[in-house]
């Protein structure tokens, strides 16, 4: 799939290399695309949310429309950043599909600053949140934030 006008990651993700915190649109974004794509940083060019990694997906699952940006963190853990206040039924279905595909899912509800875990079969919410935090800690170590 293509981004086709979605700029959700350029607004809702923390993008330190562009000095663009989560919740503020990158200054290089035109509102419907990247204004400097040809010379954009590699980290921007290589970022692909789950929606664009799919060959076929309903347009309603495009992050700017559904309000959730999904990222695969590992072979069994999926993360979703939810930036709209209401979670559409479609997202509940998507989470169930990810569970069936072998992923546990963590949803970060931006407005409430809360994490919710949706474990796959055989896992508990606590196990999933522990796995997620371990993943975050590992990233912080790799990025030298500790
Ligand atoms: S959130 Fe996904 S679909 Fe939207 S602009 Fe970013 S990569 Fe493209
Ligand atoms: S440089 Fe372009 S792709 Fe990267 S965050 Fe800014 S608008 Fe998005």
Image: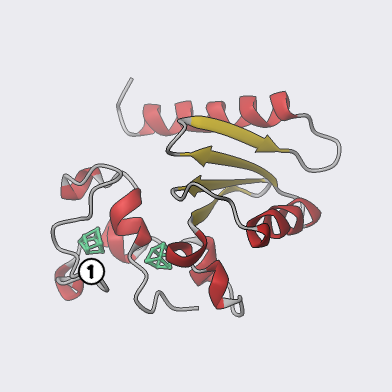
Q: In which image quadrant can residue 126 be found?
A: top right
Q: Hey, which residue is sitting farthest top in the picture? A: 146
Residue drawn 59% across and 79% down?
55
Please name the colour scheme applied to the rendered image. secondary structure
Residue drawn 63% across and 28% down?
129
The picture places residue 11, in percent across and down from the top left corner, at 29, 54
Q: Hey, which residue is sitting farthest front in the picture? A: 86
Residue drawn 33% across and 65% down?
7
Q: In which image quadrant can residue 139 be found?
A: top left
Residue 25 drawn above or below residue 22: below
The picture places residue 120, in percent across and down from the top left corner, at 78, 43
Determine the quadrant in which ligand 2 lies. Answer: bottom left
The picture places residue 123, in percent across and down from the top left corner, at 80, 33
Left or right: residue 74 compared with residue 109: right
Disc 1: which residue: 31
Residue 124 drawn above or below residue 5: above
Left or right: residue 100 compared with residue 144: right
Q: Hey, which residue is sitting farthest right in the picture? A: 122
Residue 34 drawn above or below residue 78: below
Q: Nearer the viewer, residue 112 or 126?
A: 112
Residue 138 drawn above or below residue 105: above
Q: Nearer the viewer, residue 107 or 78?
A: 107
């Amino acid at each position: 799939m293509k981004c086709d006008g979605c700029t959700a990651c350029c607004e809702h993700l923390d993008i330190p290399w562009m000095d663009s915190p989560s919740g503020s649109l990158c200054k290089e974004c035109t509102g419907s695309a990247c204004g400097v794509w040809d010379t954009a940083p590699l980290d921007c060019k290589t970022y692909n949310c789950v929606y664009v990694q799919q060959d076929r997906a309903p347009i309603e699952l495009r992050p700017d429309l559904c309000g959730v940006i999904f990222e695969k963190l590992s072979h069994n853990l999926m993360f979703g950043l939810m930036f709209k206040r209401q979670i559409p039924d479609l997202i509940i279905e998507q989470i169930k599909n990810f569970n069936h595909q072998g992923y546990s899912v963590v949803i970060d509800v931006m407005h409430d600053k809360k994490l919710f875990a949706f474990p796959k079969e055989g896992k508990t919410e606590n196990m999933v949140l522990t796995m997620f935090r371990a993943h975050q800690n590992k990233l912080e170590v790799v990025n030298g934030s500790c």
